């Protein structure tokens, strides 16, 4: 499954997904974001049981504000329309998967 680009127009359908959701809040100019991005892409390819989305904070500041994103990259896990995990900074793949599985 590929990564979905999330914006305010499709956010409600993403949030209400029956699958666990991983949101990657990023910016194109952010070095650490560029380190996390291929990990998130890999998780999306290997794990079709999850919905993986990316949110560009420069294009979607309202969504970033809604999740209190103060630094990027920020990863958020949503299950049953509730935030079950949120972390900022570069994380290894196993930590991101643990957030999704937890």
Image: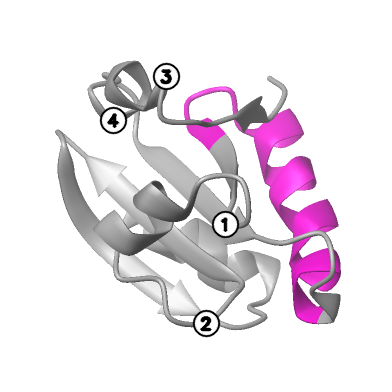
Q: Mark 1 points at which residue?
A: 57
Comes first in the chain, label 2 or label 4: 4
Comes first in the chain, label 1 or label 4: 4
Residue 45 in magenta?
Answer: yes
Horizontal and vertical percent for residue 72? Answer: 59, 75
Q: In this view, does 88 lie above or below 47?
A: below
Between label 1 and label 4, give the one nearer the viewer: 1
Q: Name the residue under label 2.
A: 71
The magenta stretch spans which residues?
32-52
Q: Which residue is drawn at 63% across and 30% down?
A: 5
Horizontal and vertical percent for residue 56? Answer: 63, 49
Q: Residues within 10 Å of mark 2 (few under 14, many from 20)?
A: few
Between label 2 and label 4, give the one nearer the viewer: 2
Q: Residues within 10 Å of mark 1 (few under 14, many from 20)?
A: many
Q: Which residue is drawn at 51% across and 69% down?
A: 74
Q: In which quarter of the image is residue 9?
A: top left
Q: Mark 3 points at which residue?
A: 9
Label 2 – label 1 distance at C-alpha = 10 Å
Label 1 – label 3 distance at C-alpha = 15 Å
Is there a contact, CB below 8 Å, between mark 2 and mark 3?
A: no
Between label 3 and label 4, give the one nearer the viewer: 3
The secondary structure making up most of the magenta span is: helix
Q: Residue at x 84, y 69 (%)?
A: 29
Label 3 – label 4 distance at C-alpha = 12 Å
Badge 4 element: helix
Q: Is residue 11 above or below residue 94?
A: above
Q: Residue at x 78, y 44 (%)?
A: 42
């Amino acid at each position: 499954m590929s990564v979905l680009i999330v914006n305010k127009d499709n956010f409600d359908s993403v949030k209400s997904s029956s699958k666990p959701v991983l949101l990657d809040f990023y910016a194109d100019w952010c070095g650490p974001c560029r380190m996390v991005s291929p990990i998130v892409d890999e998780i999306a390819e290997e794990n079709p049981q999850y919905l993986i989305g990316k949110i560009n904070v420069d294009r979607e500041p309202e969504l970033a504000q809604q999740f209190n994103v103060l630094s990027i990259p920020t990863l958020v896990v949503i299950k049953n329309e509730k935030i079950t995990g949120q972390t900022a900074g570069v994380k290894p793949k196993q930590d991101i998967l643990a957030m999704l599985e937890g």
